[in-house]
């Protein structure tokens, strides 16, 4: 019996010592595994309708700003552009003739013609100018539509979620693919009781589940002015009388000091474990990675 009590006592002592060591080791730190890598994702769609004549991209392809990604069959838009240019040329001739006639009538005066003829000449000139201006506006639209037959990259990045296929008919506003831009950061959802001493500028250890051997450093950029639940699609309503207190999560934005430049793919949504050194009251002297 005494031996059994000794064993129980030793086990309890080990548990207490282990808890004490764990507490000391994590003193001044707040950690969460409810975190993920985030990035800017740009949905790309067409401004015009038509058939895709050339598709210059592949899945997960790296692209540069200004690259021509998709080309829409330009024939219809080229014909409209040519027709509108002809209309502008014709309207320009009519406007010039109307202007010459109006000046002639005004120069001659009422001695050689009636006041009505002068007024008509002036009205014809104004009408011809209005027709010319309208034709020029339609030409500008035709030129823009023709330019939109080539869809270019708005920024550097990587092609993701591609649905566009060569030969397919597309309509304005339909998403063709998305571009994930290079900047990366971490959004970590800490319990509300963990942010008491959390401040911008504090150092962060970042561990990515996909790359367990990769040790990265970061810095707290900002703390969201509200909980994640408050800004969800269906925020909780506590005025119904069925209130149950639940510890809320507060999103914290963390920037990388120096993102890895190796073969690691820091895709948006990858799981992260973030540990913030909350004892560090002053901002870190190191510069975070650019946003």
Image (spheres, rainbow, N blue to C red):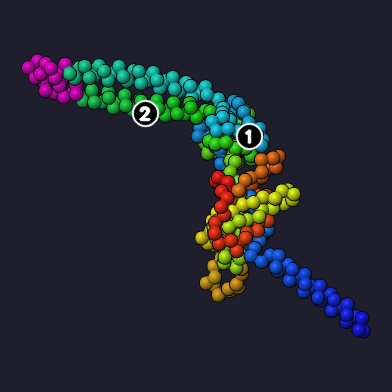
Which quarter of the rendered picture does the N terminus lie within?
Answer: bottom right
Let me know if residue 188 is in the magenta part.
Answer: no
Residue 35 appears in which quarter of the rendering?
bottom right
| Mark 1 burial class by Cα count in 10 Å: few <14, some 14-19, many 20+ | some
Instruction: Indicate whether 226 appears above or below 7.
Output: above
Identity of the residue drawn at 21% across and 25% down: 123
Which secondary structure, mark 2? helix
The residue nearer to you, when weighing 257 against 121, is 257
Identity of the residue drawn at 21% across and 16% down: 100
* Residue 269: numbered disc: none
Instruction: Indicate whether 163 appears above or below 192.
Output: above
Question: Circle 1 sits on which residue?
Answer: 62
The answer to whether one can see residue 76 in this image is: yes
Q: Earlier in the sequence, mark 2 or mark 1?
A: 1
Q: Is residue 243 left or right of residue 144?
A: right
Q: Is residue 260 left or right of residue 95?
A: right
């Amino acid at each position: 019996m005494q031996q059994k009590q000794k064993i129980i006592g030793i086990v309890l002592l080990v548990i207490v010592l282990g808890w004490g060591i764990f507490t000391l080791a994590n003193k001044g730190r707040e950690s969460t595994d409810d975190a993920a890598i985030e990035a800017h994702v740009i949905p790309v769609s067409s401004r015009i309708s038509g058939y895709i004549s050339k598709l210059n991209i592949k899945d997960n392809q790296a692209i540069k700003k200004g690259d021509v990604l998709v080309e829409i069959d330009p024939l219809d838009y080229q014909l409209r552009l040519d027709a509108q240019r002809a209309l502008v040329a014709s309207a320009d001739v009519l406007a010039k003739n109307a202007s010459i006639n109006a000046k002639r009538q005004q120069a001659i005066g009422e001695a050689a013609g009636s006041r009505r003829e002068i007024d008509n000449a002036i009205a014809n000139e104004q009408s011809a100018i209005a027709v010319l201006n309208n034709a020029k506006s339609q030409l500008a639209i035709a030129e823009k539509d023709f330019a939109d037959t080539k869809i270019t990259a708005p920024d550097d990045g990587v092609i993701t979620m591609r649905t566009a296929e060569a030969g397919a008919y597309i309509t304005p506003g339909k998403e063709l693919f998305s571009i994930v831009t290079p900047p990366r950061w971490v959004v970590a959802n800490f319990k509300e009781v963990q942010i008491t001493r959390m401040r911008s500028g504090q150092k962060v250890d970042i561990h990515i589940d996909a790359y367990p051997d990769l040790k990265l450093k970061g810095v707290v950029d900002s703390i969201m002015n509200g909980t994640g639940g408050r800004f969800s699609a269906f925020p909780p309503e506590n005025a119904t009388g069925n209130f149950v207190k639940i510890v809320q999560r507060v999103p914290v934005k963390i920037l990388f000091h120096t993102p890895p430049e190796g073969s690691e793919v820091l895709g948006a949504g990858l799981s992260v474990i973030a540990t913030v050194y909350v004892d560090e009251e002053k901002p870190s002297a190191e510069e975070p990675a650019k946003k």
